[in-house]
């Protein structure tokens, strides 16, 4: 009876175990996650139905094969690293790997695995492809948004710079307009009395000459004049008076001519009646600007080792050039003012470091003369613009500039001058006037210690530019 009872208990246990195993298999087979077991060599010994549903491979064909046979090529190295880590730590949780579906499509699976002391192990693989696609899409959206934000920020920054530049240019234009109106008004007010004086000097010279001749004849033919009159005439020293009065009238005429030239230069500089393109004499614009800056070209203090800034003009025979005359004069004013500033800076350095080696790469000599050279040239066919152009070179032998400064001089608000002396808009506005308003070219060539040269090229005819 004992043996029969043991046999029944044994069969009952087998039935229970079979039932438990059946339920376990049903549970495992119903899972959406892949459940696997592997032997000590790492080859699959068990795979549930989710393996085929997820990756498309037949379970029977997949058994006895290692996990690495199903990884995507991009994750083979990382998969081997995880297997090595599993053998050391006996557990790996939540590691993402790319598997290759039977059709070739990449499937993302999350690996959680364990290994026993007998080097047997198992684990699960959860399909996270949808999540990874969503993360990728979100990342792409974020990247697109970041790019758009950067683009928008750049656009707003550029718009702000353009706004500042436009505001500054409007202020500068208003200043130039006010200066032009003031200059034109002063020129007009001075012109009338100067013309009156200049015109009457001719008659005054003639009248004085006639009077002096009459007095000389009176002296020769009037022997019976009173002693008092004779003494008065002798006291006047008529010979000296005759010579000096003639020189005085000549000097007055030269002075009035000079005033008339200044008035003409002021009127040419203002150009209030030339808001549109008009054929003008470029040399008149340059000379008018030099006349306005004459006070800065002279050595006011007489303390420097030179007598002022020498201006060398090498003018070609230029035709009339179509341009915005007032704006072009503004460019000349900016470039010449910068040249004068550079020469004044080097002049101060030359005074302090006479005969010494300086940071400007050469010793300053006692015979150094600050000089501005202005060269104009007619070029019948420029290779860059493809048109007949006028070339204007304004060169100084001042301090010069480094390349990093040259690269930025046409940027709005960039300046190397002290606070309060420069706005950083002069060259920017000049560049815009030459390139945008006149379809020309403005370039800068400079070397530290040797000076700076600005080159302007503008077409002779603006109608050819528009075509």
Image (cartoon, rainbow, N blue to C red):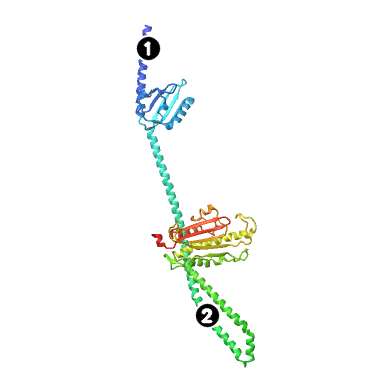
In the picture of the structure, the residue carrying the numbered disc 1 is 10
Q: Residue at x 43, y 33 (%)?
A: 74
Which residue of the protein is positioned furthest toward the top in this rendering? 1
Q: What element carries label 2?
A: helix
Asked whether the viewer can see residue 186, the reply is no
In the picture, the quarter occupied by the N terminus is top left
Residue 30 in the image, given as x and y percentages of width and height: 34, 25
Nearer to us: label 2 or label 1: 2
SS at circle 1: helix
| Residue ID for mark 2 | 202
Residue at the (61%, 89%) spot, across then down = 220
State the image quarter where residue 132 is shown.
top left
Horizontal and vertical percent position of residue 384: 45, 56
361 or 382, nearer to the observer? 382
Other residues around mark 1 within 10 Å, as few (<14) / some (14–19) / many (≥20): few
Q: In this view, does 270 lie to the left or right of 346?
A: left
Cβ–Cβ below 8 Å for labels 2 and 1? no
């Amino acid at each position: 009876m004992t043996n029969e009872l043991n046999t029944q208990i044994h069969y009952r246990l087998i039935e229970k175990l079979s039932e438990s195993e059946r339920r376990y298999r049903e549970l495992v087979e119903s899972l959406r996650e892949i459940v696997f077991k592997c032997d000590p060599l790492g080859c699959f010994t068990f795979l549930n139905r989710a393996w085929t549903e997820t990756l498309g491979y037949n379970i029977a064909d997949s058994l006895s094969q290692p996990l690495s046979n199903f990884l995507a090529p991009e994750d083979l190295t990382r998969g081997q690293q995880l297997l090595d880590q599993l053998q050391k730590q006996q557990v790996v949780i939540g590691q993402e790997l790319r598997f290759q579906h039977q059709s070739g499509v990449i499937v993302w699976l999350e690996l959680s695995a364990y290994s026993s002391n007998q080097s047997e192990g198992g684990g699960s693989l959860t399909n996270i492809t949808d999540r990874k696609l969503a993360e990728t899409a979100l990342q792409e959206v974020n990247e697109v948004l970041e790019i758009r934000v950067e683009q928008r920020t750049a656009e707003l920054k550029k718009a702000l710079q353009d706004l500042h530049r436009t505001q500054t240019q409007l202020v500068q234009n208003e200043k130039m307009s006010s200066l032009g109106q003031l200059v034109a008004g002063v020129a007009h007010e001075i012109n009338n009395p100067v013309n009156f004086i200049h015109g009457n000097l001719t008659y005054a010279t003639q009248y004085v000459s006639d009077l002096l001749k009459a007095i000389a004849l009176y002296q020769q033919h009037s022997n019976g004049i009173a002693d008092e009159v004779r003494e008065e005439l002798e006291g006047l020293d008529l010979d000296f008076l005759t010579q000096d009065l003639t020189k005085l009238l000549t000097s007055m005429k030269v002075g009035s001519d000079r005033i008339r030239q200044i008035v003409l230069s002021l009127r040419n500089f203002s150009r209030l009646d030339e808001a549109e393109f008009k054929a003008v004499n470029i040399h008149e614009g340059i000379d008018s600007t030099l006349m306005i800056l004459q006070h800065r070209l002279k050595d006011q203090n007489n303390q420097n080792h030179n007598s002022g800034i020498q201006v060398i003009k090498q003018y070609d025979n230029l035709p009339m050039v179509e341009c915005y005359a007032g704006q072009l004069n503004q460019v000349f004013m900016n470039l010449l003012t910068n040249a004068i500033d550079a020469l004044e800076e080097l002049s101060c350095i030359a005074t302090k470091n006479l005969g010494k080696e300086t940071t400007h790469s050469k010793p300053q000599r006692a015979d150094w003369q600050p000089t501005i050279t202005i060269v104009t040239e007619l070029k019948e066919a420029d290779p860059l613009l493809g048109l007949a152009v006028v070339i204007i070179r304004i060169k100084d032998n001042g301090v010069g500039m480094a390349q990093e400064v040259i690269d930025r001089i046409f940027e709005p608000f960039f300046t190397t001058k002290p606070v309060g002396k420069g706005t950083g808009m002069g060259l920017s506005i000049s560049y815009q006037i030459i390139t945008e308003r006149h379809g020309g070219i403005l370039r800068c060539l400079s070397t530290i210690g040797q000076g700076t040269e600005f080159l302007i090229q503008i077409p002779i005819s603006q109608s050819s530019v528009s075509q």
